Image (cartoon, helix red, strand yellow):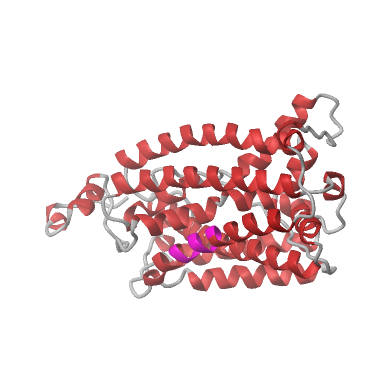
Amino acid sequence: MATLDDSDLKGLDADALKLAEMGYKQDLARKYTVLSVLGVGFSLTNSWFGISAALVTGINSGGPVLIIYGIILIALVSVCVGISLSELASAYPNSGESLNTRSIYVSDMLTFVTFKPWHVFVGYQIVNISAFFLNCYGRTLPLLGHISLWTSLVSFFIILVTVPAKAPTHQHAKFVFANFVNNTGWSQNGIAFIVGLINTNWAFACLDCATHLSEEIHNPEKMIPIAIMGTVAIGFVTAWTFSIAMFFSMTNVDDLSATSTGVPILALFYQALGSKGGAVALEALIMATGVFCLVSSHTWQSRLCWSFARDRGIPFSSYFAVVDRRTGVPIRAHFMSCVIVAIVGCLYLGSTTALNR
């Protein structure tokens, strides 16, 4: 944390003065708008994408009942979390106000072809490197936030309309709102429901993302809470309506659990459309959403690492706490974060189970 004297405070605007009161200098440019911060925050949380990517857990640990009512339950919890984060962000509007750690989840988006481990590994590293370079230019990051948000929402809308419209038959309401599936091995349905909640919980993860952009937006005391609660609201609406539409459109839940692709949502697309090409096209929309989710994740993790370094929370803090003046981003912290992600990806060559833990 830097020590500021009176000469450092001259000519500072209200946001920089507020930051100075907490002992920090204004190192990052305030180039974000509330919509672009919302774009980064929602793109990382991406609730409907989270439901689709981790559907296998919910299908086997509660089925439609788990997903439909679990989303409502976790959304209510997320409102409480969002309010708490908003209060902290309003009182302490800096990039490190809610430092935390987060596990990395990687889901294999397999299609109707067989991938060898090294294929997935190479694809993983290509996307990681691409996300690194996309986050190296501070001026373009707000635009990427907008693109990420609209990519997610447009993909959601296309899938929401296409799947129910093309499905040959539709399930009755009892199946969607009252059908419980327990393939966990636990005899108690309550335990199976609790285990399955990881699916809906993951769909509302990383609500703190917007707080780490507090030093890159004007009036963060007001704008960051708007972005946080907006993420929860959009997340609930998209995830809940997406889940209802998908469950009404599926024809055989057992086939989804036993699909050879390992990706139930892809099997569901095939059930509804009856076309491998159509199913892969819709899956491509989900993968595009996932790529932008990763780009937002790199934005988030670079600020998280940088704010840790600024507070001397990691080794070689003085080196990683530097903001590059040419790019306008904490490039050293960003690079270190990406290297760690690349190293974690190497686990896939040895064990997919280890990687997903």
How far across and down, in percent of the image, does residue 249 sit?
A: 74, 49
The number of callouts visible is 0
Q: What residue is rendered at 54% in x and 42% in y?
A: 236
In the image, residue 195 sits, relative to residue 12, either above or below, namely: above
Q: Which residues are magenta?
A: 146-153
How far across and down, in percent of the image, does residue 84 sit?
A: 42, 34
Q: What residue is rendered at 57% in x and 61% in y?
A: 294
Quarter of the image holding residue 351? bottom right
In the depicted view, which residue is nearer to us: 277 or 97? 277
How far across and down, in percent of the image, does residue 150 sit?
A: 49, 62
In the depicted view, which residue is nearer to us: 313 or 40? 40
Is 148 situated left or right of 120 in this image? left
In the depicted view, which residue is nearer to us: 307 or 231? 231
Q: Is residue 149 a member of the stretch shown in magenta?
A: yes
Q: What residue is rendered at 82% in x and 45% in y?
A: 253
Q: Is residue 7 a member of the stretch shown in magenta?
A: no
Residue found farthest to the bottom: 326
Q: Main secondary structure of the magenta part?
A: helix
Quarter of the image holding residue 241? top right
How far across and down, in percent of the image, does residue 350 sit?
A: 81, 60
In the image, residue 118 sits, relative to residue 48, either above or below, namely: below
Q: What residue is rendered at 37% in x and 45% in y?
A: 226
Is 47 situated left or right of 24 in this image? right
